[in-house]
Image: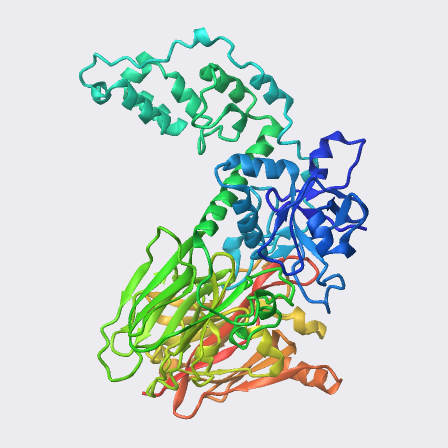
Amino acid sequence: MNQKVSCVLCGAPIVEPEPEDPSRRWMCSFRALYTVWEDWSQPRISGIGRRSWRNVIPLDEAVARQAPSAIVDEVWLKVNLLMHHFDPALHVEWNPQTVWGFPLHDCCWHLLRSNDPEVPEYVVVQNLFDLCRSQPIQHKTMDWGHDYAGLLAYELAPTALCPGESAILRGRSLIGETQLPDPINIPELQSVLDQEGLELASDHSSQLVSSKISQDPFAIFPHEILVEILTNLDSADVVSLLIASRMFVSSGLPGPFWHSRFWPGKEFSHIFELGGQGSSAPRNWRRSYGLVKAINDNPALENRRRIWSLASRLNTLIRVRAQLKDCEGIPIGPSEGCENRKPHRWNRHMGSVSPLCNSFTRGSRALYYRKSLLEGWVKKITISVNRLNGKTYICGLSFVHQQGITRIGYHPVGRSGQQIDFHDTSPCRYSISGLEIARDPRGVRGIRILSHEDGWSEWVGDHANVPKKLITCERSCEGSVEPTITIIAGFDAMNMVLLRTDGAGAARLHDTRLWYPEIPSPCLYLRGAEHERLMEYRGTLPHSVCMFGGSDGAWLPHLTEVIVWGIDWSSLGETGNNTLVFGIEFKYNKGVDDGRDSIVLGHTSASYMATPYLSTRRVLINSAGGERITGIDVMYQDPDQMAGFVVYTSYGRIREFPPHCKHYIQVDAEDGCDSFSEELRPPSETCIVGLYSTLEHNEIGVTGSYDKILMDLGLICAKKV
C-alpha cells in the first residue's frame, strides 16, 4: 500500500483518485519537484502525476536516459516522494538511478507561482528544492516550523517545549483534512469574475474632492497624493481614517482604492484573477469588492486564503534563498553528496544535525560543510543573519585579517552584516581565542567572539533563552589559550547549523555540551554521569542549570528545604518509566536571585497532579548549623532516563526518591537487567552549589499525556571560601 504523503505547500495529503468523490479531485493531481540520485543542482518540476500503489510522474526523456530503471512504461516514471535518509543500507531503492523529490498539488503549484509571478520558474525550482532538502519530514509531512495555517497541530505547543526540544507534528488524524474544497475552481468566485465591466457608469466615487473644512489636515493634498495614501493603507486603517477625516467621508472612496484591496498584501490578494497592482482591466472595483466580500466565508475561498498565506511565506524564503548565492568557504569532502554521508567528528555533540545517512525527522541538516583558514591577526568580523519564523539565524562570517578577507557561509546580496572590531595588540599570533554560540534545533541563532585583549564581544543575533555552546581552546580557567586557526561550519539552504574549530582544547563538560540558559563559569567544576549509554543521548538536548547555592556558594547558608516533585509508583514494585521527577525545588529563609524565596530545576506543576502517586518528598536542611549537600547517587534503569536518586548531607543524612530506589536498581542488576547507578561527589576543597539536568517531555503512564521530566542529574561545584 502506498503511504500517504503531504503537499509541501498546503500540508494536505496527495490522495489516490476516487471518481465517486469529485471534491477530492484537486488533491489527486500533483507535481513533483524532483531530481535523480545526487544531482542536487539539476532539479525539475514535473507534469501532473498520479498516485496508485506507487507514485508516478510524466516521463521526461532526459531523465529516462539517466535513470532507465525508474521507467514504468512509455508514459510514466516512478518517483520516491519525501525521502529523508539517503543510505543504501536503509533504503534499498537508493542508487544512482533513484528518482526522488517533493510533491505539491497542481493547484498549490499554480497558487505559488501566481503569488509571486515575477520570479523566474527556474529560480523557484532550484531554491525551493534546496529549501525542501533542509526541512525535517514527519509522518510524510514537511515541517516548516508552522502548522500549515491551522490545518495540522503539534504534539506539544512550541511554546511549551523544553530547551532544545523539537516540535513534532501529529500524524494524519485531523478531522476534515481530506474534505478540503478545491481552492482554484470555485463556482461562486467564477460568477463574480464573469461580471467584468458591468455597471461601470455607476461608480461615482472616482474623484476625491478637496474639503472646504479648514481644520481637515488632508485638505491641502492633491487628489493623486490622497489616492496614494488610501491605496497603501489596510482596510482597518482606512476605517480609522474615515473617522478622523470628514473629507474622505463626504467625497467617498475612489475606484483605485477598491482596486487596491486586491493588491499583494491586502485583504483580497488571494483573488489573483482580478489582477495585480498593474491591472488596467475595466471593472467597477467597488462592486467587485462587495461581491467578493459577500462570499468571503465560502469554504473554498477560506482554503485558498490559507494556502495563499503559506505561498506568501514560502515565496519570501525563496527570494531570500536566491539572494544568498553560493555557500562560501573551502569545501570539505570531494562532493556535496559524499561529504554528508556520515557524521563528522565536529558535530558529534550537535545531535540535532542529521547527516544524509540518518533519518531526518527533526532538527536540521547540513547540506554544505565549509572551513575557513585564519592567518595573522583578525582585525574585524562581519556576521550575516537571516530571519526565519520570527527568529534570527546566523548565515555567514567574514574575517578581515593580515592576509586579506576570508568568508564562510552565505552573505546576502544587498544586505550588510553586523561588524565586530578588535583592538588586540598582544604578541600572540591570533586575536581570536574562542566563540560562544546560541543554538536551537534549527540552527545557530546568535554568536559572540572572545579575543585575547578585548574579552567577549557583544552578542549578534538571538541569545536570550536559547541553549548555548562554548567553542574555545581554553584548557582551564587559569590556563593558556590555544589560538583558533580554522573555523569549520555546516550550512543548510539558508543558515549555519553547526560551528566548530580545530583547536585541541581539553574535553571538558563546559566545552562539549549545550547549556541552558547560560554556560557555567569555567572556574566551576562539573560532575556528571559518564556512562557510555548516556553519551550519545546527551549531545542532542542541553543541560539546564540551577545554581541553588549561587556561583560562589553565597546562598547556601540560607537554604532551608529541598522538595522533590514527581510520581512515585515504587509501592507497586516498579521503577523506570513509572518513576518520574518533574522538578527539584530549593527553598530559602531570605530572598535570593532577584528576591525569590525558591528556585526550581524543572517545574513544580504537572498535568498528572491528580494522581494518587504524586509525591512531594521533602528534605529539611539545617544550613544555619552548617549542613550542606555532599553528594548524590543517580539511578538509571533506561539509558536516557533516571529512575531515582539519593541525596547525602554533611550531617550523615540519606534521603531517597523514590524510597528504596537504590535497592530496586540493585535487584534489577542482579536479575540481569541493564540497570546502573552513578555516584557523584564534589572534588576535594569544593562544595556543591548547583545541579544540572537534561529536561524532556515524556509520556506519563498509560494515559498518553506528556510532561517535562528530569532525565539525569549532574553536580556543579565551586571552591570553598
Q: Nearer the viewer, residue 292 or 690?
A: 292
Q: 156 above or below 104?
A: below
Q: Nearer the viewer, residue 721 or 625?
A: 721
> As drawn, which residue projects farthest toward the left?
214
Q: 416 above or below 515?
A: above
Q: Name the spot of residue 109 as percent of width and height, x first.
A: 60, 39
Residue drawn 59% across the image and 51% down it: 154
- Residue 365 image-quadrant placement: bottom right
Q: Nearer the viewer, residue 477 or 268?
A: 268
Q: Name the spot of residue 280 as percent of width and height, x first.
A: 44, 20
Q: Name the spot of residue 717 as percent of width and height, x first.
A: 41, 83
Direction from residue 539 to residue 383 in the image, left or right: left
Direction from residue 365 to residue 322 in the image, left or right: left
Direction from residue 19 to residue 262 in the image, left or right: left
- Residue 403 image-quadrant placement: bottom left
Q: Where's the C terminus, which quadrant?
A: bottom left
Residue drawn 62% across the image and 65% down it: 356
